[in-house]
Image (cartoon, helix red, strand yellow):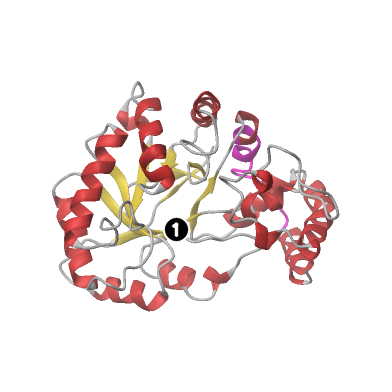
Amino acid sequence: MQTRRLGNSDLHVSEISLGSWLTYGLGVEADTARRCLDAAFDAEINFIDTANIYGKGAAESFLGEALADRPRNSYILGTKLFAPMTDVDKGLSRAQVHKQLDLSLSRLRTDYVDLYQCHRYDFDTPLEETMEALTEVVRSGKVRYLGFSEWPADRIQAAIDMVGVEKFVSSQPQYSLLHRDPEAEVIPLSGANGISQIVWSPLGQGVLTGKYKPGEAPAEGTRATSDEMGGFIKGLMTPAILEAVQQLRPVADEAGLTLSQFALAWVLREPNVASAIIGASRPEQVHENAAASGAKVDPALFARAEEIVARA
């Protein structure tokens, strides 16, 4: 497993990281989730990403218990806030930054998180208030570094321009062969300002694994058939996209990789990407995806893959 520096921080995160969005504490049984976590450590994955909203605290609670016996310096831990935990507990106000962080630390059974991320931009709270509160929690020692997820470029620039506050070191966008929006503004802006990408859904909700075939019903037990995990995949399950993914298979074969590994290697071809976050429901998926780290792929194969997807 290779690592990359996370923005202007002193954190070096594994190129493949483990997420818990629709899986741990929600869609995957605890024993299986623990085996996935063990597989991640076996594969030298050192970055674990979660959020308070995942399972309304359930993912953080699972990780707090599962990580309790591991040395705290053996992994890098990131969590997030913004989404409503109750009717009144939501957003990025000063009060919420402090309250939600303390609740997350309690569930995670730790004194600090390495990365605290704003899950979305809060248009109801002045940016100055949010940045001042985030600065307070960093300087208190409860947070080492700050990040954001899916912020508009103009709001990122506004945060960069603020003086006297702690700076962001990470951006967490959706980014894959099937979703390239960050290339237009977020990646160039981040790269010029010491901010790295830690990518969510690099496998397009599992569509880029090739397990969903055009004209065939999804197999039972997959994300597409799960009430808990399937809500975000429907827009990618079109015949044109599924057919394009199958056309990627010989390209991945030529690279000597599985489709999943090829899709992850494509994301990691971007120098501003520090890590691709995977969501695994089986330990074998962790090991397969971890093998994408350090893969050497002819850029011409990536170009061919992009052409195939562009026609979908």
The residue sitting at 36% across, 41% down in the picture is 57
Note whether residue 143 is visible: no
Secondary structure predominantly adopted by residues drawn in magenta: loop
Residue 295 part of the magenta segment? yes
Residue 43 part of the magenta segment? no
- Amino acid at pointer 1: Gln
Instruction: Give the total of numbered labels.
Output: 1
Q: Quadrant of residue 120?
A: bottom left
Tag 1 residue? 172
Note whether residue 89 is visible: yes
Q: Is residue 120 above or below residue 5?
A: below
Crowd class of label 1 (few under 14; some 14 to 19; many from 20; radius 10 Å):
many
Q: Residue 43: horizontal and vertical position, in percent?
A: 55, 31
Q: Which residues are magenta?
A: 286-298
**Foreground residue, 128 or 73?**
128
Mark 1: secondary structure: loop
Residue 205 lies left or right of residue 69; in this view the side is right
- The residue lying furthest to the front in this view is 87
State the quadrant of the C terminus.
Answer: bottom right
The residue sitting at 43% across, 43% down in the picture is 55
State the quadrant of the N terminus.
Answer: top right
